[in-house]
Amino acid sequence: MNGIHDLGGMHGLGPVNPESDEPVFHAEWERRMFAVLMATFASGIYNVDEFRHAIENMAPAEYLATSYYEHWLHSLEQVMIDKGQFNRSELEAAWSNVTAGEAA
Amino acid sequence: MPAIPVDMVIPIYTGGASARVDADVAPKFKAGDGVVARNLNPSGHTRLPRYLRGKSGTIEKDHGVFGLPDTMAHGGGETPQHVYCVRFSAREVWGASASPRDSYYVDMWDDYLDPA
Amino acid sequence: MADHDHTEPPSDTALRVKALESLLLEKGLVEADTLDALIQLYEHNIGPQNGAKVVARAWSDPDYKARLLADATPAIAELGFGGVQGEDMVVVENTSEVHNLLVCTLCSCYPWPVLGLPPVWYKAAPYRARAVSEPRAVLKEFGVEIRDDVEVRVWDSTAELRYMVLPERPAGTEGLGEDELAALVTRDSMIGVALVEGA
């Protein structure tokens, strides 16, 4: 698709801005996101092309405004639903549970 | 599909699983052939970037047979075919103001290419 | 009766990931100790120190270098490295005439077994857009200036081949052993955004 991910040659994105001595993971949630993606991928529930395409289908503004592991999060939620591993209601229930757990 | 058990982590991740497909498919091109990247604009998944569509290049190497992402992303099966490393000159890609010397080496599937 | 619109996810990404992880565990799709082992493997074991050893071996042993350039995957495996996102490797050599630069414009493809997980800048929009349209300007931002008579080759990893740059061996390192050579080789030099400095 002619999506936002197809970035080769785009202008206006600014400097590369490398971080010096960058850690492998910037937050605990990134570790967890990496791990759940890797574990489900190796199970063969979905393939890499399906995973990539789900990222490509993100809203363009959201794609540019979010980080790499947030892209993974968006994609894995979608791909799991597409593959019938859980449904949107179950995901929303999980969201309610963690939010309630935080508030408690 | 069962969850990956912990004792399989090292074997699976340090072993990997090549994307090569064991299919007896003839290549359409060989090293040295002139090719043109097709002007494909699918609404689904593809690995042919916009900046190379319609550009002329040369086959550098045949990498062998792999599945096609354009079909694999959509439950359409592997459509196994050859993947090549294709060389494009900078001026071909970006026009006369680009470097006269620099180049791009990009992997492309048979279905992305026409003979020049 | 409440009319439930699409419920929004938690705005805190950490909570959203926690929810997903809980659901996956509950459904038996992932196991907790597997998750911990994956983090350990990629945070602490796999990294650019692997690629540095490959480079040092290639600099020290011309026959190894020839094998590496001809068919990288088994040559890299000789040193005990390989696996996910490195099953089909290609190593490209920097010389006095050619400087190689790696990018994945479409996503973030990167040779994990030899370099570990990619840095944020490699996966972010500015590098992916500009490494192809203005590679020399990007190199300059990294402090690398390539002479006009040297060809810059940009490799865009569109397929499942994974690339690594074999940087030029710096002058004055002739007496060094492999371990000392490996210590000079940076991750950035194996992507092509840095040169290897001498000892």
Image (cartoon, coloured by chain):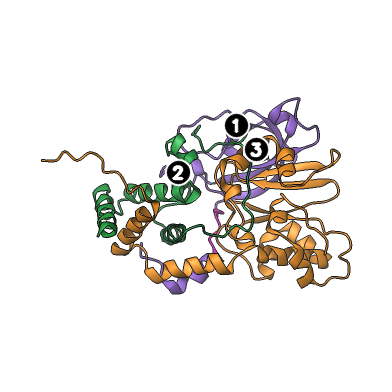
Chain colours: A green, B purple, C orange
Residue closest to the eye, B32 or C143: C143
Q: Secondary structure at mark 3?
A: helix
Q: How many marks overall? A: 3
Q: Which residues are magenta?
A: B14-21
The answer to whether marks 1 and 3 mark residues whose Cβ atoms lie closer than 8 Å is no
Q: Amino acid at mark 2?
A: Ile
Question: Is the residue at mark 1 from the same chain as the one at mark 2?
Answer: yes
Q: Which residue is mark 3?
A: C130
Crowding at mark 2 (Cα within 10 Å: few <14, some 14-19, many 20+) = many
Marks 1, 3: nearer the viewer: 1
Which residue is disc 1 drawn over?
A12
Q: CA distance from mark 1 to mark 3?
A: 10 Å
The answer to whether tags 3 and 2 share a subunit is no
Q: Disc 3 or disc 2, which is closer to the eye?
A: 3
Dot 3 surroundings within 10 Å: few (below 14), some, or many (20 or more)? Answer: many
Vertical placement of residue C87 versus B57, above or below: below
Q: Give the answer, above or below, for where A3 lies relative to A35.
A: above
Q: Which residue is mark 2?
A: A55
Give me the residue at 43% from left, 66% from top.
C35
Quarter of image, res C32 = bottom left
> Which of the image's four quarters has the C terminus of chain C?
bottom right
